[in-house]
Amino acid sequence: MVVRHGRTEWNASRRFQGHSDIPLSAEGRAQARALGDALRGRTFARAYASDLGRALETARAIAEPHGLAVVPDARLREFNFGKWEGLTWNEIVERWPELRDHGSTAAKLYVPEGGESFAVVCDRVRAFFDEVATDGEETILVVTHAGVLHATLEVFGHAIRDRRGDPMSLNFSPASITELALDADGVRIITLNHVAHLDSIA
């Protein structure tokens, strides 16, 4: 199960966070508690999270009712956005106008100045899952970021496409749940960007 961290103030203002260690907002903490409540009945063998505070805090809200310690792993960090961090997309294209046609969610085309490419993010995500993936007999919890969620789908061969087969933009919501099942046939998507558990705080 792969969960995106709860909302931050930079999410609300649509700023690129990357490796900047921005904490959860009050809303984000409420979302983390809602995740903990919604997943209280599930069983997790292990819990991992990005080592950035917003992911760790979200993960602990889920893991603590299960008596699990959260293992931080830097491979689960968001994109390193380099000089883009702290900026909105409009501010980015003002400084780098050649990016204007890419769009703010074209992660595969990102190579931020001083940051990393989507391919590099995929490499570290692949290394993480190669190390911790199970045979389907147990469920692990992974709390991370939107960019890593996109990289996870890419690594497992599930890039989201529209009816014509073209790549489709998907914005992973804060505190969303995506569940993947690994079996003999490969990796199946069980739940994608699920947010019904947040209805009580909307």
Image: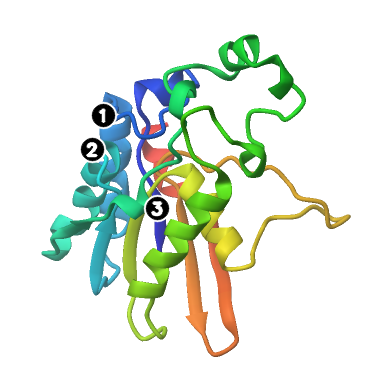
The three-letter code of the residue at mark 1 reads Pro
Mark 3 secondary-structure assignment: strand
Mark 1 secondary-structure assignment: loop
- Work out which quarter of the rendered image holds the C terminus and state it: top left
Residue 194: x and y in percent read 50, 52
Camera-nearest residue between 21 and 202: 21
The three-letter code of the residue at mark 2 reads Gly
Q: Are marks 2 and 1 in contact (CB under 8 Å)?
A: yes
* Earlier residue among tags 3 and 2: 3
For disc 1, the marked residue is: 23
- Work out which quarter of the rendered image holds the N terminus and state it: bottom left
The three-letter code of the residue at mark 3 reads Val
For disc 3, the marked residue is: 3
Q: CA distance from mark 3 to mark 1?
A: 16 Å
Residue 132: x and y in percent read 33, 73
For disc 2, the marked residue is: 53
Image coloring type: rainbow
Residue 84 lies, with reference to residue 181, above or below; the image says: above
Q: CA distance from mark 2 to mark 1?
A: 6 Å
Residue sitting farthest toward the right: 164
Q: Are marks 3 and 1 in contact (CB under 8 Å)?
A: no
Residue 43 lies, with reference to residue 4, above or below; the image says: below
Residue 91 as seen in the image, left or right of residue 141:
right
Q: CA distance from mark 3 to mark 2?
A: 14 Å
| Picture residue at 33% right of the left edge, 38% below the top | 31
Q: Depth-wise, is mark 3 or mark 2 nearer the camera?
A: 2
Q: Depth-wise, is mark 3 or mark 1 nearer the camera?
A: 1
* Earlier residue among tags 2 and 1: 1
Residue 149 as seen in the image, left or right of residue 95:
left
| Picture residue at 25% right of the left edge, 46% below the top | 51
